[in-house]
Image (cartoon, rainbow, N blue to C red):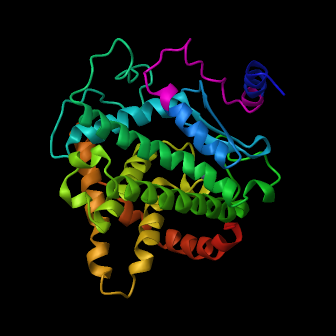
Amino acid sequence: MKTKEERLEELDRILMDNNLGFIYDFLGERDNGLVLPFFARYMDGVIKKGLEFCVTTDRNATAGILYKHNLVFISYGLFDRLCKLSLLIYSSGVLDGKEKPFNFVNLHLVENPFQGFSDEADNFGDKSEVQLLLFIFDSLLGFIVAHEIGHFINKHGDRLDFSGDVRGHKHIERDELIPSHARELVADHYAFRALEFDIENTISSDNPVVSNLLDKFKSQRGMALLSLLFIACYFKLMDGHSPYPHFESTHPEAGVRAHFLFACYLEPYMDTNQQNYMSEVLPLTVSMLQEIYEYKGDDFVIDWSEKNSSEEIKQWYLEVYSELHKWSA
Ligand SMILES: [Zn+2]
């Protein structure tokens, strides 16, 4: 049996061999007050699936799974961005109708870290408001970790001869593009269902966070809206931050991933009398997404539906759809 220190050294070596930085040192590094509690929580979750979980020191936004080592990792850089994104969603008032001040102009600026829960920070408003912020954060992080678990559950590593999804967005040759994108969409779908399930559980239970949410989020449709909104906010955060364009990257671009999940969400309602009502979720998600990012002063138009209607992307959809079943366990 290895000691904890020996295992940490081993993990450090594995990360270093893959150019992923080092294990994040909770006590030595600047702690924002959230890394440790959430690390402990997700460690428990992934161990149940037969995986290990670690936070790396990398300041870029990375997350992935090292198949050979059954190791899911998330970088401190991504963790910090998610903290700020959670605060933005929370402060915008879109979820609870109450706007609060928000001071991070650039969510990607790790040099100006979120430290809202560190020992020195002023505390947030009342307890239920803190719970709302943590609920948002947990939903975002939960989606990202579940995406990596989705690769594992669907046995993507067993069928590949590379060591895995390591650097997130890598360059890829055209002939490997469709299988790679199909794997990403299968993992996204798994993570979307997992998030939807968690949100439904939270809202249908007596969780105190529910009292903060506007009533429109408490219906069946509202819960789906909430799940899609969180995911869309994350995709928007990463939109334009992939080093390669859609047709040269291991991962489909953000707008396309969002569009695919919208389609997955809507599928069970197609050709039913709920179709029109449920499909209103899509424009609602996009307008709330817009509202959230505008709250920090962004001026932009989300062109996702335009992107998804190009001939090139339509052809891509046909190819990728016929590939999906190969990567679903
Ligand atoms: Zn992936």
Q: Residue at x 71, y 71 (%)?
A: 326
Reply above or below: 249 against 270. Answer: above
For the record, the magenta segment spans 14-37
Quadrant (top left/top right/bottom left/bottom right) for the N terminus: top right
Q: Say how many tags the image has.
A: 0
Residue 265 lies, in percent from the top left, at 42, 69
Residue 197 picture quarter: bottom left
**Magenta segment: does it hold 304?**
no
Residue 281 lies, in percent from the top left, at 30, 67
The residue most toward the left is 98
Q: Residue at x 58, y 44 (%)?
A: 45
Depth check, front residue: 50 or 13: 50
Depth check, front residue: 261 or 244: 261
Left-right relation of 176 to 234: right
Residue 156 picture quarter: bottom right
Residue 157 lies, in percent from the top left, at 76, 53
Reply above or below: 168 against 315. Answer: above
Left-right relation of 239 to 93: right
Quadrant (top left/top right/bottom left/bottom right) for the C terminus: bottom right
Q: Residue at x 59, y 74 (%)?
A: 321
Q: Is residue 60 visible?
A: no
Reply above or below: 52 against 203. Answer: above
**Magenta segment: does it hold 17?**
yes
